[in-house]
Amino acid sequence: MPPQDLPPGLYDHPLSEAEHQALASQLASLHQLEPLDPAEAPQRLARYLRQLSEIALAALPEAHRQQQQLALVNRFVAVLQEQAPKTITAGDRLHPSARLLQELRAAQLLPGQEAITRPLIPLADGTLLINAPSEPSVGLALQAEVPSADRPS
C-alpha cells in the first residue's frame, strides 16, 4: 500500500523505504518508530516478504502464470540458498510439476481399508472457527480433523 494511503492509526510492520520517505516530510511527533527486535526479526520480515510475494505472484501475466510463479519462487529459493547454504538447499526448490503433496502412507492400504479423510479446513490454513451460520461448525471440523491427527505407529 502506498504510504500516502496510510490512514492514521496503529501499525506494526517493518518500515518500507517508501514509508520512510513519506514520514520524513511529516513532523516527528506525528509518528512513532521502534527498532526491530532481533529476536522477532525473522518472523516479522518473513511476514512482510510473504505479503509482497503474494502480490507479485498474483500480478504475473495470466499466460503461463503458474510456470512463472514457480520460476519466481525458485529464484527466491536460490537467493536464500546463496545466503544460507547450510539450511537451504537445491532440494528446497519447487518441482516444475506444480503439484501438492497431500498424503504419505507408511504402507499400502489393505483391502477394505479407507484412506484418511482430510479435514474440512486445509492443513496449511489458519482459519479461526467462530460457529457462524455460513462457516463450518466447530464440532464438524473437529470430527473431520481427529482422524487425520498424528497417531503413534
Image (spheres, rainbow, N blue to C red):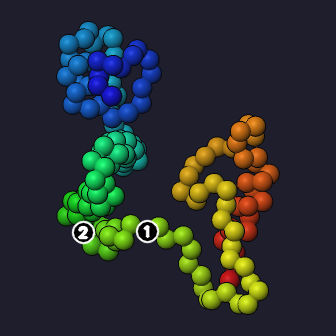
Q: How would you rate the neighbour count of disc 1 (Cα within 10 Å): few for under 14, some for 14-19, many for 20 or more?
A: few
CA gap between label 2 and label 1 equals 25 Å
Tell me which residue sits at (40%, 14%) in the image. Answer: 8
Tell me which residue sits at (67%, 87%) in the image. Answer: 109
Tell me which residue sits at (67%, 56%) in the image. Answer: 120
Please state the horizontal and vertical placement of residue 5, each as a whole percent of the image: 33, 19
* Quadrant, the C terminus: bottom right
49 w.r.t. 105: above or below: above
Q: Quadrant of residue 40?
A: top left
Q: Is residue 32 left or right of residue 119?
A: left
Q: Quadrant of residue 145?
A: bottom right
Q: Is residue 81 left or right of residue 58?
A: left
Residue 85 tag number = 2
Tell me which residue sits at (76%, 46%) in the image. Answer: 137
* Three-letter amino acid code at the position of disc 1: Arg
* Three-letter amino acid code at the position of disc 2: Pro
Please state the horizontal and vertical placement of residue 65, each as a whole percent of the image: 31, 54
Instruction: Assign a secondary structure to mark 1.
Output: loop
Q: How would you rate the neighbour count of disc 2 (Cα within 10 Å): few for under 14, some for 14-19, many for 20 or more?
A: few
Please state the horizontal and vertical placement of residue 46, each as a whole percent of the image: 36, 48
The residue to which callout 1 is attached is 99
97 w.r.t. 107: above or below: above
